[in-house]
Amino acid sequence: MVFTNWARNQSAAPAEERTPASTEEVVRAVRDAAASGRRLRMVGTGHSFTGVALTDGILLRPDALTGIRSIDGERVTALAGTPLRALNELLDERGLALANMGDITEQTVSGAIQTGTHGTGRDSGGLADQVVELELVLADGSVVTASPGEDLFDAARVGLGALGVLTAVTFRVEPAFLLHNRRRRMTLSDILDSLDAMTSANEHLDFFWLPHTDACLVKTNNRSPGPPSPPSALKHWLDNTFLENTVFGAACALGARFPALIPRVNAASAAALGDSESVDTSYKIFTARRDVRFLEMEYAVPREHLGQALRETRDLVERMDWKITFPVEVRVTPPSDAWLSTAYGRRSAYVACHIYRPTPNPAYFEGVEEIMTRLDGRPHWGKLHTRDASYLAKVYPRFADFVGLRDRLDPGRMFGNAYLEKVLG
C-alpha cells in the first residue's frame, strides 16, 4: 500500500489507510492513532510536489468525505474531501460561485486551502481568503470550529495539516458571474515596462513567458455583464486539449530527447501564439486542464520586486544556457491575513518555474530560488523548495505564533512528518 503524488516525485508507505465518511470517523482514526503512538495525515489528490501530505502511520483518504453539507445565504459548507471541480459545479447549479480560484480543479478543498492555493487577483485573494469557518479534529480527538477573530482561524486556514485534520470548510460565495477572458501575445520587455498599469487595470492577470524568447501569453479576466460568448466546442478542444496538452506534451518529449532543439521549439510555440477572447461562467474561465506532468517551484515576492525577479530569472537562464521547455508563470494577489499565506501582510507577485517531469533540472530551481530568497520570497508550501524553519521565520511575521499554537495543540506531533519538521522546526 503506497501513496504516490500526481508528479510521481513523492511517495509513502503508510502502516494503515482509512477512508472516513464522516467527522466521527476522523475522530475515531485520530484517537486510534493516539492510542497506538502512530502519526496521522489526511491526503488530498496528491497535487503537492513536496512531502507535505506523507505519513508512515495512518493515512486518511477523504474520497468519501465529500459534498455540500449546508448552504446559508452566501455561506456554503463543503466537506473537506470535495474536489474543487465538483464544488464549482454544485455551486453553479445553485447560482453561486467562488470569487477567485486557481487553475487546477482536481484538488480537494482541504488540500488546496492547507497548502495556500491562490490563483491570481488584483482585489480578491486565494481560497483561504474566502473561508469564513473551519471544522477541525484536534490531536486530542476533540472537534472544534474556528471562526474569524480567533487565532486558530487565522493559523489553520493555511495550516499545512499541522494543527488538526480539516473535515469541513465554509466559504463565502457570491451570485454566479461571467468573466471576459482575453488572451494576447506581448513581449516580456513590454510587460516589464507596464507591470503596474497591467495589474491595476485588470481584475485577474496571469502571464506566461517562454524561455529563450521574448514572447509572453497574457491572460486577463474581468467581470462582464454578458451576454455569454463561450468558445465553441471545437475551439475549446483545440486550445485546451490539443494545443496546450497534446501538442505541448509532444514538444516536451522532443525537447527531452534533443535538448538543443528546445530554443527552436519555443520559438515555434511563440510564433503560434494568437489573440482570442470569450465570455463564460467564471469557473470555466479560471480553470484549465493540465495533462503534461511536471515539477514546479513557485515563490511569492513583494509586488514591487516582480520586475527585478523576472529580469534576473531571464538573465540567469540565458547566462547558464539551460534548455527550458516550460513557460514561467506570473500571477498576483492582494495581502492576506492568514498567518502562513504566502501573501500574508503584503501585495504579492508569484513566479512559478516548471520542468518537464522526465527531465528534472535541480540547478534551474536552485538558481531561481537564490534570486527569490534575496527578494524576501516565500515558497509555495506545496511546491518544491529548500527553505527551512530558520529562513521561514524571517519572512513570516506570525511564524512563531503558528509554531507556538502547534506546540499547544499537537505537542506529541501526531500530525507531523519529515516535511513539517523541516519547515516548522
Image (cartoon, rainbow, N blue to C red):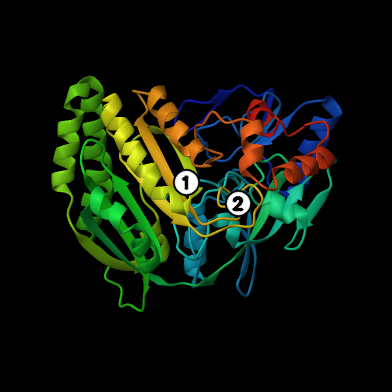
What is the spatial separation of the Cα atoms under label 1 and label 2, in whole angstroms? 13 Å
Mark 1: which secondary structure? loop
Image position, residue 298 (x, y; %): 46, 40
Q: Amino acid at mark 1?
A: Glu
Give the residue at mark 1: 106
Task: Rate crowding at label 1 as few (under 14), some (14 to 19) or many (20 or more) other CA atoms within 10 Å.
Answer: some
Expressed as whole percent of the image width and height from the top left, the position of residue 352 reads 41, 41
Name which residue lies at 79% across and 41% down.
404
Q: Quadrant of residue 257?
A: top left
- Vertically, is 209 above or below 98? above
Residue 319 vs residue 28, the one in the foreground: 319
Can the viewer see residue 400 in this picture? yes
Secondary structure type for disc 2 = loop
Label pair 1/2, CB-CB below 8 angstroms: no
**Quarter containing the C terminus:** top right
Q: Earlier in the sequence, mark 1 or mark 2?
A: 2
Q: Is residue 111 above or below residue 206?
A: above
According to the picture, the residue beneath numbered tag 2 turns out to be 66
Please give the name of the residue rendered at 21% of the width and 46% of the height, measured from the top-left corner. 215
Q: Is residue 422 left or right of residue 289?
A: right
Residue 25 appears anywhere in the view: no
Q: Quadrant of residue 389?
A: top right
Q: Residue 212: x and y, percent?
A: 22, 35
Image location (x, y in percent) of residue 33: 79, 31
- Position of residue 311 in the picture relative to residue 419 (left or right): left
What quarter of the picture does the N terminus occupy?
top right
| Badge 2 amino acid | Thr
Q: Is residue 274 left or right of residue 29?
A: left
